[in-house]
Image (cartoon, grey):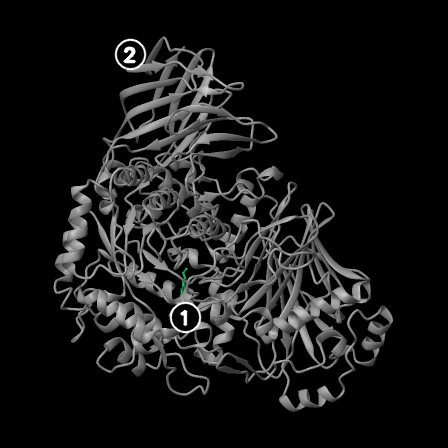
Amino acid sequence: MLPWTLLGVLSLLITVPDALAVKSHDFKTCSQAGFCRRGRAISARAAEAKSAWKSPYSLDVPSIAITPNKAVFKAGVKSSLYPDIKFGLELRVHEDGVVRVRMDEVDGLRKRYDEAASWALISEPQISQEITWTAGKKDIRAKYGNNEVVVAFQPLKISLLRGGKEQVVLNGRGLLHMEHFRTKQVAETKTEEAAPEAEEGAEQVVMDVAKEVNPRAWFEGDTEDDWWDERFSTWTDTKPKGPESLSIDISFPNHGTIYGIPQHATRLALPTTAGDSPTFTEPYRLYNADVFEYLASSPMSLYGSIPVLHAHSADSTVGIFHAVGSETWIDVSHASDKSTQTHWISESGILDVFLMPGPTPADIFAQYARLTGTPVLPPHWSLGYHQCRWNYISSEDVRTVQKRFDEEDMPVDVFWLDIEYANEHKYFMWDEKNFPDPVEMTNDVAANGRKMVVIVDPHLKRTDSYPAFKEASDRKVLVKPASGDGEYEGWCWSGSSSWIDFFNPNSWDWWKSLFKTTALKSGWSWTLSTTDIHIWNDMNEPSVFNGPEISMPRDNVHHGGWEHRDIHNINGMLFSNLTSQAVRERTDPPTRPFVLTRSFFAGSQRFGAMWTGDNLGTWEHMAVGIQMVLANGIAGLSFAGSDVGGFFGNPEPEMLVRWYQVGIFNPFLRAHAHIDTKRREPFLQEEPYKGMIKDILRLRYTMLPVWYTAFRETSVTGVPVLRPHYVVFPKDPKGFAVDDQYFIGSSGILVKPITTKGATETTVYLAEDEVYYDYFSHHVYRGASKGKDITVHAELHEIPVFVRGGSIVPTRERPRRSSPLMKLDPFTLRVALGKTGSARGELYLDDGVSYSHEKGQFVWREFSAETAKKVVRLTTKNLGLERVGEAVDGVALASYNPGNEFAKTIGEVRVEKVVVLGLASKPTSVKVEGGNELVWEYTPGVAAGGKGEGVASVLTIKDPKVLIVKDWAIVIQL
Ligand SMILES: *[C@@H]1O[C@H](CO)[C@@H](O)[C@H](O)[C@H]1NC(C)=O
């Protein structure tokens, strides 16, 4: 047997017995987390007390201070439970109407962690200059446009209204509770005053009595429930700061569906966790965790956390972003089918909630993008196919795999190396026995235009012979244990390890320097690298095999004295941030980095791609992967995918084919497999599966122009690459729960991947009265204004892909070995005429690797078709000129030169084929305006089924010799 495989298996058995045994019991339920138990108990007591429940928090009216520009107001907040404790509330209205609500304890014994937003936000948002706060007897309010923010004094309640209707309400249910800092002694005397426990089902009278006898116990319980330390399994979490959790209810009285708060393996429209017969009994948990063999349907935490949600109705959409980096649990319930209640319980940190007023999903994407940035425009090649496995065991193995792809004419852009490339899992250092020639190996891969990605994890093997560890230790940039002294030590792939504290600014430049391929460091073999190698950041939750919940103890200490609990969910983002900066800055001028991360937070979209972690090779995981990728897009992180084939298990050929079909319609397309699985590269499959997978991969490559154009759009607008129905048809309630079909960008491509065994057909929901063309057969379907299900073929070789009538889709149809080889290939335009005979589409191109597009080096075309008086005119114009001045995030383009250097490089690239679907009759002539008759073919449509259904008429125009970068018109005379 191969020594590497053995070693891998051995290292698994020896070093990670815990990880192998992981089951749900390795992770806390709400009732096993002291602060979550306390938070849920508040809502339970509130539910019991019904209308007698009153929030103890109120605004300290005399303290209201409005800034001279009137846009910000600050005031003290008091809790009747603790009259001596002071809280401060601050509300700001941003220029785009987003309302920021911050509340913190003031002059407390300690300081709460208030920096979560500073890591997530791209910059300090612009405050509106047009707001006027007006204080009345009961509230202070600000009206702007159709919106109004109202802060009621007693009890404290904050509402965002539109058109006089409440859209978002904070503390409307009175669950706000910011546990203040206290000393242990004070707390001990308090237990003595505890009131006798109220009996279950107690009457209102009893509640009132309890409230009078001991209001604190009535509100927050009568025991010091895990205030000062907490046990879980064999671990004790010391809590030197004591209780400091934060509970806040956020309600959406006019919105019945919510989406977001990834990452959870569940439906896109989030099922309930509270109220009457909830779907899940646990709240959604946000605590980045390495969950071994995670469940395909669960509110459990996974690898990343983005505390962002959309609340949606046919009337409008509103959004919430809670900038909190500590563990957070979120209960979801519906008071009616038209309203949603959420309850957020966080372990530490301040209240820092952004209310995004919408009113459309697109508005919220823009509002959120202004806060945390848009997704980065990735290198073009990273949209190709990524071939990964734990592990390709040697440079010869890599070469052989590449050779097999080439022999079979299967496209692939990137070969990946998992942890076994590194000598004893010391990242940056090659295992010289099996990878004696990393530069030559990478160059062999790069010779075909391809790249490599290798893994760099955040755990550093604790040995002085490992320069990365030694230097980090010398610089004192490692995470500290609870004592605050020395270096925290835990167990991971590399055995005894320590973790870099990326919250420490001293780690930043040093980390970046490690990636310089030209830096000569004695004893380092990472210098045996090239700029064709990009990076995979795994295990950055962080995963610690012998730590509580497979992570770091919460009382570990980071830079600034903050405990790990305060920043846990942000931790993974900093790692990919610094890594992407490092890869970007390897060259001068910089080139676009590709960094894949497993852990993420709000803002991670700026640094690269994520994947859904260690999924299982099951149909359920295949299906939920789509929903998870959609949910990530909702929360801003569009560049997402789930491992094709499933990480664990040996998928049968049918499943593998279906998984490739799912994969090519994910923004990030990678096949990956566990070390214990059988090799399953596409070329190893038997026919007919091998041929099917080859066709599927080729389909992805033909559609790269669609993907890249969609990525460009999201990099400017924040509207996700994958668009679920509610994003495209916000007013159609029938589409709100649809999460197994979606559109790609604005292209008009609608796809419904098959995720069930033995499928031969499926139903597809068409939300509008428009024609939809089968992408392959040109079968045409007609939707209905109230929505309609159609039944379509879906045999194993078939993927339900449709072009929405009214779209023009640019593709490149010549098979190539890798995407860079397609650079000068001609285009095909699919013109899918809508029911009114018109269509439009876009194509964005740039060099795909540099940042020259930010300086106007790109080509951005619009294609449109109009039918009038028996003439169909297909024209194209330059959209680049309209891009001038446009920017959600970053620098707006100051000018645009259509003859820019990049445009020149593709100056000769032409359209080689135009396919027009849905012409009313056979043309009498087809010409480029001002030119001769073109070569064309026409197949008449065949009516069948209902009105307008059947097979569409197809006009194929061969080689019209028109150029992509030029304006032209093709005139079709009917
Ligand atoms: C992270 O990325 C942003 C750019 O998006 C940068 O401004 C910031 O300084 C970075 N560093 C850290 C440590 O987050």
Task: Decide if residue 206 is on the left or right side of residue 484.
Answer: right
Give the quadrant of ligand 1: bottom left
| Residue 939 point in image, percent of width and height | 36, 15
| Residue 68 point in image, percent of width and height | 66, 63
- Examine the image and state in which quarter residue 703 appears: top left
Whether ligand 1 has any atom under 8 Å from the Cβ at mark 2 is answered as no
For the residue marked with disc 1, what is the amino acid? Ala
Name the residue that disc number 1 marks: 21
For the residue marked with disc 2, what is the amino acid? Glu
User: Which sits in the foreground, 251 or 490?
Assistant: 490
| Residue 516 point in image, percent of width and height | 23, 65
Name the residue that disc number 2 marks: 933
Q: Which mark is residue 808?
A: none
Task: Decide if residue 550 is on the left or right side of residue 515.
Answer: right
Q: Kindly tell me whether residue 544 is visible in this rendering.
A: no
* Label 2: few (<14), some (14–19) or many (≥20) C-alpha neighbours in 10 Å: few
Residue occupying image coordinates x 51% and y 30%? 790
Of tags 2 and 1, which is closer to the observer?
Answer: 1
Circle 2/circle 1 CB separation < 8 Å = no
Residue occupying image coordinates x 25% and y 51%? 414
Q: Quadrant of the C terminus?
A: top left
Q: Is residue 608 above or below residue 61?
A: above
Q: Is residue 802 above or below residue 599?
A: above
Q: Kindly tell me whether residue 554 is visible in this rendering.
A: yes
Q: Is residue 100 above or below residue 717?
A: below
Residue occupying image coordinates x 65% and y 65%? 248
- Examine the image and state in which quarter residue 163 appears: top right
Task: Decide if residue 213 is on the left or right side of residue 311.
Answer: right
Q: Quadrant of the N terminus?
A: bottom left
Is label 2 in a helix, a strand or a loop? loop
